[in-house]
Amino acid sequence: MLVCLAGHPSEVLSKDRIIKAVWPDTYVSEGILTYSISELRRAFGDDVKDPRIIQTIPRRGYRLIAPVVQLAPSARPNPPSRFCPFPT
């Protein structure tokens, strides 16, 4: 999920769009998405009421608000494309 959000920094990604990208062949409820976002926030010490990393956009989705730094192509890991199949 983090790779997907980082691939679209500052862009609001709908809940449905994230679910389809992260779990393409599996039915998951919105609760799993909420739990996963919560776990990312916990890992980064982020606060839902005063976000520095992931912002919730009510009734729309989520946005990565932390700065994203592009690595040089030779240093960039190659995550599987299934993590964010929608165009940039």
Image (cartoon, rainbow, N blue to C red):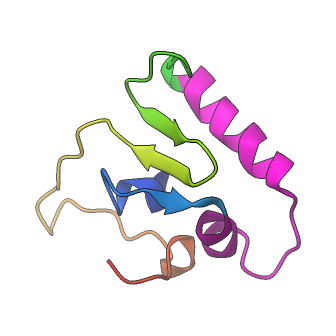
Residue placed furthest toward the front: 59
Q: Magenta part mainly helix, strand or loop?
A: helix
Residue in view at x 33 percent, y 63 percent:
77
Question: Farthest left residue?
Answer: 72
Queried whether the magenta region covers residue 31, the answer comes back as yes
Q: Which residues are magenta?
A: 16-43
| Image height of 66 relative to 46, above or below | below
Of 44 and 29, which appears nearest the observer?
29
Give residue 45's position: percent from left, percent from top.
51, 16
Q: At which x and y percent is residue 65?
A: 33, 38
* Up-down relation of residue 39 to residue 63 (above or below): above
* Identity of the residue drawn at 50% across and 75% down: 80
Relative to 5, is 39 on the left or the right? right
From this viewpoint, is residue 46 visible?
A: yes
Figure quadrant of residue 15: bottom right
Q: Is residue 6 magenta?
A: no
Answer with left or right where residue 12 lies relative to residue 49.
left
Which quadrant holds residue 83? bottom right
Residue at 85% from the left image edge and 75% from the top image edge: 26
Q: Quadrant of the C terminus?
A: bottom left
Residue at 57 percent of width and 55 percent of height:
60
Asked if residue 1 shows in the view, the reply is: no
